[in-house]
Image: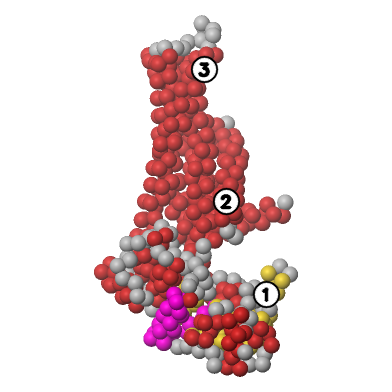
């Protein structure tokens, strides 16, 4: 238990170092653009692939389960929309990003630690935590909502393609279902969750990378810890945020 | 000049440095020698503030480094250059980016001025036309020279070198040693070198401090080190087959 509190304390102390004014705006801007590209844009492919196929699966499963003639087939579109916007895109895609982006952040910073690159920054008088982690956090918070909106589109698109291809639901019914009782607040809810999850992924992974000590083995362990703890915290916060925002 | 006064450093229950007091003179290559695990790297990291001392003080030309806050240390660190064991070059930047990094971070010079400075320091370490190469494309000796170029790009007052010869062949080691000595004398800086390479000791050791089991055991220079009757130091100096034969 003491270890847990020590880790949380160290995380808070590191975040204090991270959230300070960047030493040079120009350098921060360059780093931010690089991180947006490497953490966000390079994830577009995997996000599109997973979202489209999951949307397709959700729509097929929903159509398969509608056996009563009293339930209109437009419910397939409605179900796909609700599940994709409320849960699948913000949470599941964030969990996937925790694996992809989290391991990348932890291993990159961990390698810099064990090869003394972070010590070199400190010796120069650079706030290494701010220099390395802050642009990653800001980039994740800015680009993850874009990825999630993109994921929503791809999920619904995947569902529609699956229905048209299998002939289970007509385009007309599917589109009608998507438009039933649409509440803009659900998008706000999804984006809010995404911003929280983006902060968790980048800060937790940055923390585990930054405190790495040892060699290649420890970098691997840091990477694993980053993914595991980011995922666990995302799941916990998912419940808390859902309770706060939807009740 | 840098002074260490009564430095103690403890990790867990193991006291790594025991009341170490030592001074390192300006314009000289000051060597810290000792066996692996003797505490010389810990001493160097205490001197530059990468480790906090448990007791004792570190003085940089009458400025008490130990009592400085983060901002004060940040200012002082702009006067410090350090060469790490593996070079510690930033993998994501090419040679020019690495050497220019401190200039980008701490100066407002125009790009042409910074490029001129980068080319000057690279030429000083005998490296030319390597600006676009990535660290992974460099040999061990080249990496060390780029790291020296980066360390001196801000015209430091203090230069720290942690085992600059590790992993290098004897010839390249000699080149790096002489480069460090030349730069020290040319720019009148206080240089501290951690090493256990006796070739370095005998060629550039203007001042030599021997650390044994965390204590300052002996202090002298490259002339006196061969004629001491200190048993532990003699075991270290003449510990290899080559040096013991030479002694005989």
Magenta highlight on residue A141: no
Q: Is residue B121 above or below residue B190?
A: above
Q: Is residue B188 above or below residue B124?
A: below
Q: Chain of mark 2?
A: A
- Is residue B15 shown left or right of residue B184? right
* Residue A190 % position (x, y): 48, 35
Q: Tell me the mark number nearer the camera, choosing from 2 and 3.
A: 2
- Residue at the (51%, 38%) spot, across then down: A96
Q: Which mark is residue A62?
A: 3
Q: Chain of mark 3?
A: A
Q: Which residue is mark 2?
A: A220
The crowding category of the residue bearing disc 3, from other C-alpha atoms within 10 Å (few below 14, some 14 to 19, many at least 20), is some
User: Would you say residue B61 is visible in this rendering?
Assistant: no
Please state the extent of the stretch shown in magenta in the rendering.
B171-194
Q: CA distance from mark 2 to mark 3?
A: 40 Å
Magenta highlight on residue B182: yes
Q: Nearer the viewer, residue B240 or B89?
A: B240
The crowding category of the residue bearing disc 1, from other C-alpha atoms within 10 Å (few below 14, some 14 to 19, many at least 20), is many
Q: Chain of mark 1?
A: B
Q: Quadrant of the C terminus of chain A?
A: top right
Q: Nearer the viewer, residue B23 or A23?
A: B23
Residues at discs 2 and 3 both on one chain: yes
User: CB under 8 Å between callouts 2 and 3?
Assistant: no
Q: Which residue is mark 1?
A: B16
Whichever of callouts 2 and 3 sits on the residue coming sooner in the sequence is 3
Q: Tell me the mark number nearer the camera, choosing from 1 and 3.
A: 1
* Residue A25 % position (x, y): 37, 60
Image quadrant in which you'd find residue A167: top left
């Amino acid at each position: 238990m003491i270890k847990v509190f020590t880790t949380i304390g160290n995380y808070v102390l590191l975040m204090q170092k991270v959230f300070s004014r960047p030493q040079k705006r120009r350098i921060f801007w360059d780093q931010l653009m690089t991180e947006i590209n490497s953490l966000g844009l390079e994830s577009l492919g995997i996000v599109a692939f997973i979202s489209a196929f999951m949307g397709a699966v959700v729509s097929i499963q929903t159509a398969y389960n509608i056996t009563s003639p009293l339930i209109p087939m437009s419910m397939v579109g409605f179900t796909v929309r609700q599940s994709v916007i409320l849960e699948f895109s913000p949470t599941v895609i964030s969990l996937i990003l925790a694996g992809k982006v989290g391991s990348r952040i932890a291993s990159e910073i961990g390698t810099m630690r064990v090869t003394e690159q972070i010590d070199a920054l400190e010796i120069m008088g650079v706030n290494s935590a701010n220099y390395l982690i802050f642009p990653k956090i800001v980039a994740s918070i800015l680009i993850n909502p874009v990825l999630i909106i993109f994921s929503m589109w791809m999920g619904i698109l995947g569902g529609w393609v699956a229905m048209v291809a299998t002939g289970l639901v007509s385009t007309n019914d599917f589109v009608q279902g998507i438009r039933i009782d649409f509440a803009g607040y659900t998008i706000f809810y999804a984006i809010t969750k995404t911003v929280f999850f983006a902060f968790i992924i980048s800060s937790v992974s940055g923390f585990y990378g930054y405190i790495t000590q040892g060699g290649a083995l420890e970098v691997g362990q840091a990477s694993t810890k980053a993914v595991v703890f980011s995922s666990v915290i995302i799941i916990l916060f998912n419940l808390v945020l859902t309770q706060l925002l939807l009740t | 000049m840098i002074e260490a006064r009564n430095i103690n450093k403890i990790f867990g229950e193991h006291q790594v440095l025991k009341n170490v007091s030592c001074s390192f003179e300006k314009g000289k290559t000051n060597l810290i020698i000792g066996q692996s695990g003797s505490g010389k790297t810990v001493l160097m990291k205490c001197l530059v503030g990468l480790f906090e001392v448990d007791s004792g003080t570190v003085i940089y030309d009458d400025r008490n480094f130990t009592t400085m806050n983060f901002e004060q240390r940040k200012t002082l660190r702009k006067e410090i250059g350090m060469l790490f064991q593996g070079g510690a070059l930033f993998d994501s930047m090419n040679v020019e980016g690495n050497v220019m990094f401190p200039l980008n971070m701490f100066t407002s010079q125009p790009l042409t001025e910074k490029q001129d400075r980068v080319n000057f320091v690279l030429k000083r370490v005998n490296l030319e036309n390597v600006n676009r190469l990535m660290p992974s494309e460099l040999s061990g000796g080249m990496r060390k020279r780029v790291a020296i170029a980066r360390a001196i790009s801000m015209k430091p007052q203090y230069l720290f070198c942690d085992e600059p010869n590790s992993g290098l062949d004897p010839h390249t080691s000699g080149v790096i040693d002489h480069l460090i000595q030349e730069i020290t004398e040319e720019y009148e800086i206080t240089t501290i070198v951690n090493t256990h390479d006796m070739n370095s000791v005998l060629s550039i050791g203007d001042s030599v401090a021997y650390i044994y089991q965390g204590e300052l055991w002996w202090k002298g220079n490259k002339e006196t080190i061969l004629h001491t009757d200190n048993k532990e130091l003699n075991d270290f100096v003449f510990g290899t087959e080559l040096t013991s034969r030479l002694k005989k």
